[in-house]
Amino acid sequence: MRTTLDLPEDLLNEAMSVADTKTQTVVIIKALEELIRKSTISDIKRYKGKLNLEIDIELAGQSL
């Protein structure tokens, strides 16, 4: 999808340097992916202490 953005050039250049990429498109894609990843992690952390994920390996391998 093509879109026009008005981004601060210094911020974009710094992000490109940090991400070690030479194109603006790639750095923006990486930034969006990271934003989504952090949001997903934050959502998962809400369940900390609320789920019991202990699995009995021997019992899990038995047929019912």
Image (cartoon, helix red, strand yellow):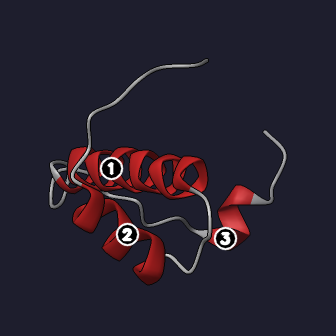
Which sits in the foreground, 26 or 33?
Answer: 26
The 10 Å Cα crowd at callout 2, few under 14, some 14 to 19, many 20 or more, is some
- The structure residue drawn at horizontal position 26% and vertical position 44%, both measured from the top left corner, is 7
Of circles 3 and 1, which is in front? 1
Of circles 3 and 2, which is in front? 2
Indicate which disc, 3 or 2, sits on the residue closer to the N terminus: 2
- The structure residue drawn at horizontal position 69% and vertical position 57%, both measured from the top left corner, is 60
Residue 5 against residue 46 in the figure, above or below: above
Q: Position of residue 3 (x, y in %)?
A: 47, 20
The 10 Å Cα crowd at callout 1, few under 14, some 14 to 19, many 20 or more, is few
Residue on which the image places disc 3: 57
Furthest residue toward front: 9
22 displayed left or right of 19? right
Q: Amino acid at mark 2?
A: Asn
Q: Which mark is residue 35?
A: 1
The alpha-carbon separation of the residues under discs 2 and 1 comes to 19 Å
Which sits in the foreground, 38 or 20?
Answer: 20
Residue on which the image places disc 2: 13
Secondary structure at badge 3 equals helix
Secondary structure at badge 2 equals helix
Which sits in the foreground, 8 or 51?
Answer: 8
Indicate which disc, 2 or 1, sits on the residue closer to the N terminus: 2
Q: Amino acid at mark 3?
A: Ile
The alpha-carbon separation of the residues under discs 3 and 1 comes to 35 Å
Q: Position of residue 1 (x, y in %)?
A: 61, 17
